[in-house]
Amino acid sequence: MEMMDSHGYQELRPSLVLREPVEEHSIRFFDEDHLVALRWDFTVALARMLLRRFPEPPRRISYAGDVFRRTAQSWEPMEHVEVGCEHIHLDPADSREVDVELACLMMSLPSVLGLKGGILALGHAALLRRPMDAEALPKALSSRLVWALERRSLHRAAEALADHPAAERLLAHAETLLVEPDGEASLAALGHSPYAILLEEERAHLQRALTALTPLLPDNLILRLDLADVKGLDFYTGPTLRLWAPGAQQELAAGGRYDSLFPDLGRPWYAAGFCVRLTRLLDLAETRPELFETE
Amino acid sequence: MTILIALPKGRIADELLPMLAHTALALDERAMKSRVLCIPTATPGVEALLLKGSDLPRYVAGGVAALGVVGSDTLDECEVDLLELADLQLGVCRLSLCALQGISLESLRRKPHLRIATKYLRMTRAWLRSEELTAELVPLQSSVELAPILGLADAIVDLVQTGSTLRAHGLQEIQVMGRTSARLVASRGAYLSEPGRIAPLARLLTSALLKP
């Protein structure tokens, strides 16, 4: 939080109990006749709070606290401690500057968190979203394709698309996205996708991001392009970043641009942000202490 | 740090282990005959775990093993977060709805209370949904063929390789619901945070195991 304070992020505290229990993984219960949910995500909780209380959004917001999610496995924790920040702006022309500011904050995380090193994976949600929209893929089929790529599974993608007229094009594109996480070589491969022209802008965006961020990288951080990062595709609309510690099982921080959240709620605001998963960080410190600086 | 590869015991292992012999991932034969749990391979720093198929995804998803080979039927029955890098086309089977000779899918559809015995509950539920059918599922772990013979269920859902076991019990396949095979899986964290270490091993396993 100190890091965020020092960069002008103002802490807001959304309620732990939300009256919009729409998320299927939320923990829900009745308060008299009203179905309510424990906060499952800060971004959504903050968005609703901002809509109620601010005619103009505060530009820089930070948060810290618990979120609760139902888990697939009984042994997984339902309570997670998260810290994060959001940058909301009115002019889309500010997006690039905002994205670089947030990326720089994420790049400083390994040092702030005491990690010896980290890997920052850069992706872009539109790399899959736009071809799926262009092919007018039905929602159920889109979900299956996203699920397959989330598993980095070309054969599952082929199974999902089996009878679709655009199967060949989409599979060739999926193969391009599934190159091993790399730098500029992956970006060059994207130029050979059947959707290369459609994704010209996104490709240029990623190229600019690599060019802008590479010189700013601290010594203990590697920047990698991960074209198949399709996690959270329903939420993210633009570039995404995920911070990994080498050998860690789960990402320690994740964020990106989500320009459809506020318009969907009736406000023409643009937004990006990231969240640090403190519970995972503490687990990692316990199980893999060698990944952390000793002092 | 040693990289662990989880390999399944049983039917898939019978096909898989001979294919690894004479490769950089050949398992140490002396260790195989002993009771050690981690078996060294021909590559220093890479060891294999031989696990029951149903346990294997958890070892990979939990990051204990960086890579693994497991049947897609096992994967589809459990909800674990891992990467599925390749269809190795080993141990290929059909997942089929089977019933006694003379019974058709239409006659099953007409039953007011259909009972299906299976080990594959999730996949059967998904198929029932897609067919807009309802049925009572009878969970069984083995010898599922007995269920329709002894009247425990009207039909079964099971893996079929050649169909000889079915025929021996007077059963027939009445609907193929899907295809299953061995898959190369990877721990999300290991693969994405250390691609330089894990991806070459994944390629090595794929080239050794994927039939041309």
Image (tube, coloured by chain):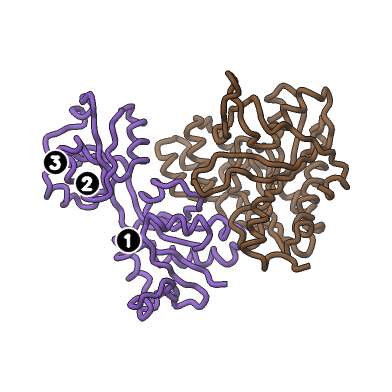
Residue A68 appears at what percent x and percent y? Answer: 62, 39
Q: Position of residue A151 (x, y in %)?
A: 51, 49
- Dot 2 amino acid type: Val
Q: CA distance from mark 2 to mark 1?
A: 20 Å
**Kind of residue sitting beneath label 3:** Leu
Q: Chain of mark 1?
A: B
Q: Which residue is mark 3?
A: B150
Instruction: Of the two numbered discs 2 and 1 on the same chain, state the one appearing first in sequence.
Output: 1
Q: How many marks?
A: 3
What's the residue at 73%, 62% (across, down)?
Answer: A115
Q: In the image, what residue occupies the spot 56% across and 43% down? A: A194
Q: Nearer the viewer, mark 2 or mark 1?
A: 2
Question: Are marks 2 and 1 in one subunit?
Answer: yes
Direction top: furthest residue: A33
Is residue A249 shown above or below B127? below
Q: Give the drawing colour for chain B.
A: purple
**Which residue appears at 62% of the width and 42% of the height?**
A127
In this view, the residue in front, A81 or A214, is A81
As drawn, the chain in brown is A
In what quadrant of the picture does the C terminus of chain A appear?
bottom right
A282 vs B174, left or right, is: right
Q: Position of residue B195 (x, y in %)?
A: 59, 62
Label 2 and label 3: CA atoms lie apart by 11 Å
